[in-house]
Image (cartoon, rainbow, N blue to C red):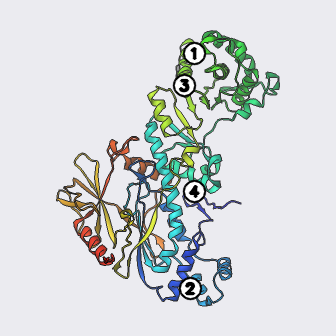
Amino acid sequence: MNNFVDSNDLSSNRNAVVQPLLTDWYQISMAYAYWMSNKCQDHSIFELFFRKNPFQGEFTIFAGLQECLKFLENFHYSDSDMEYLKQKLPETTGPEFFEFLKGLTAKDLKVYAISEGSVVFPRTPLMRVEGPLPVVQLVETTFLTLVNYASLVATNAARYRIAAGNNIKLFEFGLRRAQGPDGGLSASKYAYMGGFDATSNVLAGKLYNIPVSGTHAHAYVTSFSSLSDLSVRKIKKADDHTIEVDLVDRALEYRTQVAELLHILLEESNDGELAAFVSFAIAFPQGFIALIDTYDVLSHNPPFASKDIQFWSGLLNFCAVALALVEVGYQAKGIRIDSGDLAYLSVRARETFHKIAELYKLPWFANMSIIASNDINEETIISLHEQGHKIDCFGIGTHLVTCQRQPALGCVYKMVEVNGNPRIKLSQDVEKITMPGKKEIYRLYGTDGYALIDLLQRSCEPPPKVGTKVLCRHPFQESKRAYVSPAKVESLYNIYWKDGKICHPQPSLAEVRDHVQKSLTTLRQDIKRNLNPTPYKVSVSDELYSFIHELWLQNAPIGELF
């Protein structure tokens, strides 16, 4: 079953599973209790935020906003929804409540949010949702499920991009490891948003216009056992399709030459592997990439023994086929290594490419791609950099899409105001105390162009001004405070939903992807580094600080000693 509604506009594709019943049961229960209590017209304000950055880092990428807006566009309860709820709610539930639900839409909601793809931080409200209490409550779980995983994957992908640098390509190969088909599609979308270059997920490519990429599996290589398995041996020349060349004969001749150049015994190469490479090259002469580590061929050459024996068979056969392709007017693209010492093997492969480029006067041969896969994570990439690898592209799956270092972001959705009256949630854990009331968010920049601090203010306060000193305070620790004279002030909120429709231009996925990278450039390097990053500060104005603590004291119980 295809859960996605398809259209000619790829940006409008939505998951049909995302509907009002994609929620927790207690949201339905509360909606009924609100209705019974005549609170349906109560005006409420909720905020969506998280309390801690993921992956032991100090930044997060906000993602999932467009999916939330698509959900609001299609928010209504169907006839089958009504029938199901009638079966599950108590028999005493009056028909008027079901009529109330049947008529619900998101037309009375307002949604303010930070731009999708922005770098964000703990306690900063990513979204502010205003409207009738039951409706604002009913969208909670759906909003959380749409933002939590999306932001987690986008952040993970952004961290991989930072670790890899801008000159290395990143391919997402995670569909087969993802938490189900919806998880796989979301991972592909938000990994691309976070900075990956392509995906192996064909449906994600269609739905989201993401470049797709892939090579072949070990199974393709092992499906050939000898050169006699080849039913097609010839390939047409690129500039003259009337001329056919036997690619096997040419590859065998070049294999002998390359083996001599590299001091490799021909017995170390596998003919079935060569047959597979020839077959794949005939099928894809303009994009020939080969997986070169299938066979563990016994090495009789001491310098290459044990560490890379299977690698040399694959590399030898690849180079032979790549040189044969040159004769018919095509350029091979590169190799993929899926096992072994990736740093060492990539260096040896690059050395080999340079030798062949020099011998055969083919400068492009030296720069062919070396793709590495094999359970790669962020630390692996950092380590490979330290070892001086020669890899051009990483194919990353499991650690990216499952976010193994931290499988959940922990976004929450809390009430901060009802009917103009602020609400605060108290806790013995200070981190779980909410900041009451309707607020605005500003990002203050220093003279060096980097973001200094995020400032939360009450909506009734005037915004901070460039060059004017403003007192920024920690929301709960009295002694932590500082004056800031911003060189630039950025208001982070825009209104995205009003009067039942999206009211802010929606960027394409590629545009959000660009925004991610631009947003990250506003942070100092020490905030983005992998090891012991510097925390970014989120503060409140002096007026909001006083407001929080006054309300805290009003609501905190006074103990009594005996």
Q: Name the residue under label 3.
A: 346
Q: Identify the element where label 1 is drawn.
A: helix
Q: Identify the element where label 4 is drawn.
A: helix
Q: Mark 4 points at which residue?
A: 10
Choose the circle earlier in sequence order: 3 or 1: 3
Spatial CA span between label 2 and label 4: 34 Å
Q: Mark 2 points at which residue?
A: 100
In the picture as drawn, the residue positioned furthest to the left comes out as 468
Q: In which quarter of the image is residue 42?
A: bottom left
Q: Mark 1 points at which residue?
A: 356
Identify whether 268 is placed above or below 5: above
Where residue 320 appears, as percent x and y from the top left, is: 66, 19
Q: Identify the element where label 3 is drawn.
A: helix
Choose the circle earlier in sequence order: 4 or 1: 4
The one of 12 and 550 positioned closer to us in this rendering: 550
Identify whether 211 is placed above or below 236: below
Q: Tell me, yes or no, whether the two marked residues, 3 and 4, touch with CB atoms within 8 Å.
A: no
Instruction: Report the side of 450 relative to 15 (left or right).
Output: left
Spatial CA span between label 1 and label 2: 75 Å
Q: Identify the element where label 2 is drawn.
A: helix
Where residue 415 appears, as percent x and y from the top left, is: 41, 73
Instruction: Report the side of 135 relative to 21 (left or right).
Output: left
Spatial CA span between label 4 and label 1: 44 Å
Of circles 4 and 1, which is in front? 1
Q: How crowded is mark 2: few (under 14 residues within 10 Å), some or many (20 or more)?
A: few
Q: How crowded is mark 4: few (under 14 residues within 10 Å), some or many (20 or more)?
A: some
Choose the circle earlier in sequence order: 1 or 2: 2
Choose the circle earlier in sequence order: 3 or 4: 4
Q: Tell me, yes or no, whether the two marked residues, 2 and 3, touch with CB atoms within 8 Å.
A: no
